[in-house]
Amino acid sequence: MERMTTGLIAGLTATAPMTVAMELMHRRLPQREQYPLPPREITMKLADGVGLAEHLDEPQRRDLTMLGHFGYGALAGALYAPLARRCPAHPVVKGAAFGLGLWAASYAGWLPAAGIMPPPTRQPARRNALMIVAHVVWGAATGIVAARLAEAEHGAFSRARGTIGRRRSNSAPRSEPAEEPIGATATGRGLERVT
């Protein structure tokens, strides 16, 4: 559960640089390809499916899109963290690979299968490239943040164990030294008793 929480935080955090990258690349597309990005398309398609879209004004549509986008990033991050622990690669490599896999599973997988978006083969190449790069950015950032959080958790755990160990050793009951038998000559106290 801790790993999933770590991943959730990492995925949520990584969605911010992903969003910035998407916006910057979107502005560089030809005008005819600057229609709404997939998070907006997906959110509005889902909202329309439940009869909500027609009741939303533009700020509400934008807020709902961001909520869905960051929520999906957090959920995907929660799936990433447990898998990442099993792979010995660098966090950036693991994260980027997971980001590419997430893009493929979503944009070439469940989104077209659910009729929410057309498959990548029916999208402009530049828009596909934009979303692939954005998912690599998200994945790399998720990998870095998850690794840093795991290191911080491990460090905190180690420090806590050290503190508990020191407390135990400091608070352990001290046994009184055993009395030496009368006539012992090994110590000064024993000599006093002999004479």
Image: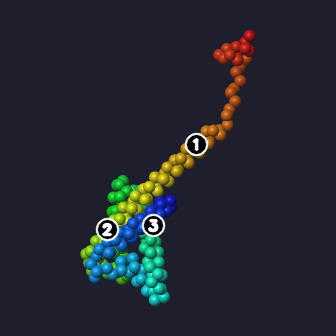
- Report the side of 165 relative to 37 (left or right): right
Mark closest to the chain's N terminus, 2 or 3: 3
Question: In terms of secondary structure, where does tag 1 sit?
Answer: helix
> Mark 2 and mark 1: span between their CA atoms?
48 Å
In the image, is 171 to the left or to the right of 118? right
Name the image quarter holding residue 173: top right
Residue marked by disc 2: 133
Q: Residue at x 34, y 71 (%)?
A: 24
Q: CA gap, disc 1 to disc 3? A: 36 Å
Position of the C terminus by quadrant: top right
Q: Nearer the viewer, residue 14 or 114?
A: 14
Image: 169 above or below 1 = above
32 is higher (above) or lower (below) than 76: below
Tags 2 and 3 in contact by the CB under 8 Å rule?
no
Tell which circle, 2 or 1, labels the residue nearer the N-terminal end. 2
Query: Residue at 46% of width from left, 89% of height from top?
Result: 54
Q: In which quarter of the image is residue 37?
A: bottom left
Task: Name the mark nearer the viewer: 2 or 1.
Answer: 2
Tell me the kind of residue under disc 1. Gly
Disc 3: CA contacts within 10 A as few (<14), some (14-19) or many (>=20): many
Foreground tag (1 vs 3): 3
Name the residue that disc number 1 marks.
Answer: 165
**Residue 7, position as x, y percentages in the image:** 45, 62
Marks 2 and 3, how far apart at CA: 17 Å
Query: Which mark is drawn over residue 144?
Result: none
Which residue lies at the image location 49% right of the left edge and 49% below the top edge? 155
**Looking at the picture, does residue 169 appear above or below residue 67?**
above
Image coordinates for residue 84, horizontal then vertical, percent: 40, 59
Is residue 104 among the parts visible in the rendering?
no
Circle on res. 12: 3
Q: What's the coloring here?
A: rainbow
